[in-house]
Amino acid sequence: MKLTLDVENTTTERNGKLHLDPFESSNSLTMVGMLTDTGEETIVTFDHNDVEATQDGHRIVQDALNEATVLIAHNAAYDLMWIWESGFKYDGPVFDTMLGEYVLQRGIKEPLSLEACAERYKLDTKKQDTLKEYFKKGYSTRDIPHDELAEYLSADLHATQQLSDKLVYRLNTESDAMLMPTVTLTNEVAVCLARIYQRGFKVDLSVLEDVRQEFEQEKCQLIDSLQVHVRKVMGDTPINLNSPEQLSWVIYGRRVLDKQYWASQIDPYMDDEYFRSLIVSGTERLYRTEAVQCTECKGSGYIRKIKKNGEPFSKESKCPTCSSAGYLFNPTSTYAGFKFKPPTAKWASANGFSTSKVNLQLLEAGAKSKGMDDAVDFLSKVRRLSAVDTYLSSFVDGIANYTKHDDMLHVSLLQHRTSTGRLSGANPNMQNMPRGGTFPVKKVFVSRFDGGKIMEADMAQLEFRAAAFLSQDGVAIEEVSNGFDVHAYTAKVITDAGQPTSRQDAKAHTFAPLYGASGYGRTTAEAAYYMHFNEKYKGVADWHSRLAKEAIETQKITTPSGREFAFPDVVRKASGRVSHFTQIKNYPVQSFATADIVPIALLHIDELLKDMKSCIVNSVHDSIVIDVHPDEEEDVINVIQATNNILNELIAVRWSINFNVPLLLEAKIGPNWLDVKDVV
């Protein structure tokens, strides 16, 4: 029996965030709606203020789940979590209509809500406007009139069932049948990710507070150090480094004269000569200033005006001479700022010139090669300050806000947010954690077991290995097979080109050409490496050309797993360049590596762990994180080693592919997610 299921539940707002999950103690299951493939509909009430709970409701739902051969739902992971946490059991297959539609979109993002899908497919459904009005007024689902809520739930059930029929029909047509294996894998992974969410990842809140204090202290030190630089190059002019406009003043030493005119004139593709003339006519050089006390207000910032009758006003007014600053900032004859020159029109912005992370890195590299030590220090600290702010808001605050009363953070991993199928995260998004083993936030994650440990199994250089296979580049395959240190080689190429670079710093460049980076706008030494990459890995460059040809001829590209990406408006320009070329090069590598290979490893490891207490608690990019019970450490190590030995076989079984490039699953283990040491 195909069973379509949907749940209604209460939600909780805490710390300004809406918590929808069953792990929030104040949340409860309101209703469960079920619709069979023969049209039998059942709505079971569990917690509503208007009516009593359905008699024998738990048995009714469980009986239906027992009979189900497949569970159909829109965002199945959400419904699974609620029925599992409400005491129901279901471990059969699912068909997630949201994920099915996502795969069929082929990387072209359109809204995936049930309401949006129903509108696209012209399904029978009910507009959600009335429900939204109830929620705006602060109603809980248990407060919405029972009949109305049941009516909406029924409409959603029928829309989901109809959508399922439409998707299955499409997946059996000649044009879409190739995507069926991807849909099948995606549904299998959805169940696995729901289990990961349900398990949770233990957080040591005392360590989290220590990390917060470390970051706060570093932030203060960075601000103090940066203000020293600012005073040195700007004089007494007050600068708010959180303002892109004022940061642009410091870096480039110029200020836009008329923002409206400037915005109307800038064009990333404007002629270089015109861009230079626009800088001269549309901006002004800044000069370092000296602060002097305002003689009008005597430094107070306020004056007391006099009425026509000669009496003073009772309240003071802001001083118009100094704009209530108390000081006037008189320009000196010395140019202000670090006086960088934007290299191309693409660096122009509404606030003057770009202060993006990437462009600051480019400026820093250029300053380093020219021995501009103060500029290097300033730019590196600006980037670090931005990173620390992100770490505090996104990670420290995010973890604190979403960790439950039992110190568990339930990791939300989503399959439908990226264009490539690569997992994204939410609440917080741990996919955005810096790579490498130095990020202090990781140490807040510990084992739920007394004496337990955290293991991270990482697929080494997975995307490069995937690219080596996809392109069949002989040099890349040989290097992977022989364990060649590609990052050290990158560092050598850039260093030999005149820019001393460490192996660690070189990592940012090694595989960048795989994802469409051309080296344009980079320093001369870095650009030399990007050119060298295409010469060294000619098979990769040729493969990129074949991808472009495939996209132009078919308006799509297909990976060996059958996953497809649509490019309906791709064109070859007069210059010979192909539009969307960055995505054309990027999507196959990222999707095959992290949306196909990692998931099958994840499913295999989860299956091998199913009879153990140890369990998977997270997955980030190409790694799998396991909470290891103290009595099972050797067993889990054996699981990773066994998986490592058959990775290529797993690919062959799943897709009948001869993956002729070695894959390597490395594992580290330790008392927390940060302090781990190699074991495999």
Image (cartoon, helix red, strand yellow):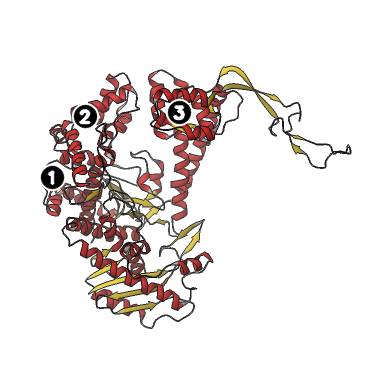
In the rendered image, the vertical position of residue 457 relative to residue 63, given as above or below: above
The quarter of the rendered structure image containing the N terminus is bottom left
Q: In which quarter of the image is residue 404?
A: bottom left
In the rendered image, the vertical position of residue 455 relative to residue 355, given as above or below: below
Query: At label 1, which amino acid type do we have?
Result: Phe
Q: Quadrant of residue 178?
A: bottom left
Q: Nearer the viewer, mark 2 or mark 3?
A: 2
Residue 661's x, y, as percent? 14, 40
Query: For mark 3, does the 10 Å Cα neighbourhood hold few (<14), some (14 to 19), or many (20 or more) residues?
Result: many
In the rendered image, the vertical position of residue 63 relative to residue 548, given as above or below: below
In this view, the residue in front, 502 or 31, is 31
The kind of secondary structure element at disc 2 is: helix
Q: Is residue 671 visible?
A: yes
Question: Is there CB contact under 8 Å for labels 2 and 3?
Answer: no
Residue 16's x, y, as percent? 51, 56
Find disc 2 in the rendering and name its residue: 534
Query: At label 3, which amino acid type do we have?
Result: Leu
Residue 524's x, y, as percent? 32, 22
Residue extending furthest toward the right: 309
The quarter of the rendered structure image containing the C terminus is top left
Residue extending furthest toward the front: 574
Query: At label 2, which amino acid type do we have?
Result: Asn
Q: Which residue is drawn at 61% across and 22% down?
A: 289
Residue 379's disc is 3
The kind of secondary structure element at disc 1 is: loop
Q: Residue at x 38, y 54 (%)?
A: 202
Residue 659's disc is 1
